[in-house]
Image: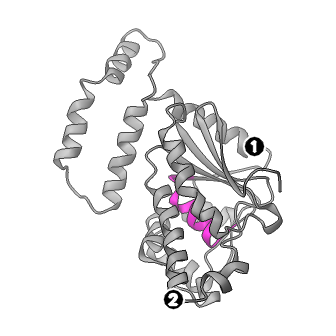
């Protein structure tokens, strides 16, 4: 491991890289890593220069091989300690799922258990051909929370989610693409370049539109089925916004729009 923390935020132009940095354990997620995530996410959310957050392993060997089970005897020693640990994990995953800007999991190597939980909490998942996915509570006698389970069901549907949860089997990258668990399957040599290019495309668009769209999609996933006063206000206000004026002018003048970050 480098001299950097076990999880850290690296800022690179419009991209924020949330890096899992425990390679000796294939980036197994420690209690300290889970606990650090909300503050790192808050930093990235408040930084106006960051348009997209990418979660990745520190190198190509692993995304995250799950929670750090070597800690389980201690963190689950008592009902109180177990509940406290579980709430730390739930908060981290919820903050990632509710992050206001676009998020991408860039996945190489194993993406298992808590690692898979982080991946499905992201908006999109780009994986290379080395990626392997698994959700193994049935092999450990554990039960995932409703929120954690819903993230998987929302991505791949109930039957496929139950298949993965019942068996704990590993799913390779081609099958993950086929069932909708990942959104792009790339060669190892191409994944970072492609991810950067995709982030650049997002950064060139209207951040007002993108963040409003993400908020509305989240409302739909949470069960909102028809427009609310809030969504109608977002729809109406857009036509009086600076980004609309710039987008319309650029279209009429046949040039590329230059949106300001917000």
Q: Percent from the top left, x then y, of residue 63?
A: 71, 60
Q: With 194 as the anchor, is 50 left or right in this view? A: left
- Along the polypeptide, which appears first: circle 2 or circle 1? 2
Look at the image and say whether residue 33 sits in the magenta stretch.
no
Quadrant housing residue 198: top right
User: If the image is split into quadrants, where does the C terminus sit?
Assistant: top left
Q: Is residue 221 visible?
A: yes
Q: Which numbered disc covers residue 251?
A: none
- Number of marks drawn: 2
- Per the image, label 1 sits on a secondary structure element best described as loop
What colour scheme has been applied to the protein in the rendered image? one colour
Left or right: residue 130 versus residue 224 is right
Q: Dot 2, how many residues are within 10 Å of its Cα: few (below 14), some (14-19), or many (20+)?
A: few
From where the camera sits, is residue 181 visible?
A: no
Tell me which residue sits at (43%, 71%) in the image.
147
Secondary structure found at label 2: helix
Q: Which is in the foreground here, disc 2 or disc 1?
A: 2
Q: CA distance from mark 2 to mark 1?
A: 46 Å
Query: Looking at the rendered structure, which numbered label has been put on residue 190?
Result: 1
Say above or below: 47 vs 132: above
Name the residue that disc number 2 marks: 79
Bounds of the magenta segment: 111-124
């Amino acid at each position: 491991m480098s001299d950097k923390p076990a999880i850290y935020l690296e800022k690179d132009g419009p991209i924020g890289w949330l890096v899992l940095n425990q390679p000796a354990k294939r980036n197994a997620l420690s209690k300290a890593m889970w606990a650090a995530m909300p503050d790192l996410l808050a930093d990235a959310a408040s930084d106006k220069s960051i348009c997209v957050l990418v979660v990745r392993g520190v190198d190509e060997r692993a995304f995250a091989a799950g929670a750090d089970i070597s800690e389980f005897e201690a963190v689950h020693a008592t009902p109180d300690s177990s509940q406290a640990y579980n709430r730390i994990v739930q908060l981290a995953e919820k903050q990632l799922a509710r992050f206001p800007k676009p998020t991408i999991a860039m996945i190489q190597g194993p993406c298992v258990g808590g690692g898979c939980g982080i991946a499905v909490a992201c908006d999109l998942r780009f994986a290379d051909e080395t990626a392997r996915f698994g959700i193994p509570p049935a092999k450990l006698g554990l039960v995932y929370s409703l929120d954690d389970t819903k993230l998987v069901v929302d991505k791949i549907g109930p039957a496929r989610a139950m298949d993965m949860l019942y068996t704990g089997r590993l799913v390779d990258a081609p099958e993950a693409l086929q069932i909708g668990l990942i959104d792009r399957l790339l060669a190892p040599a191409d994944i970072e370049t492609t991810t950067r290019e995709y982030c650049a495309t997002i950064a060139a668009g209207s951040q007002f539109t993108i963040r409003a769209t993400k908020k509305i999609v989240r409302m739909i996933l949470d069960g909102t089925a028809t427009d609310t006063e809030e969504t109608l206000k977002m729809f109406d206000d857009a036509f009086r916004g600076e980004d609309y004026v710039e987008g319309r002018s650029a279209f009429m003048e046949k040039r590329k729009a230059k949106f300001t970050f917000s």
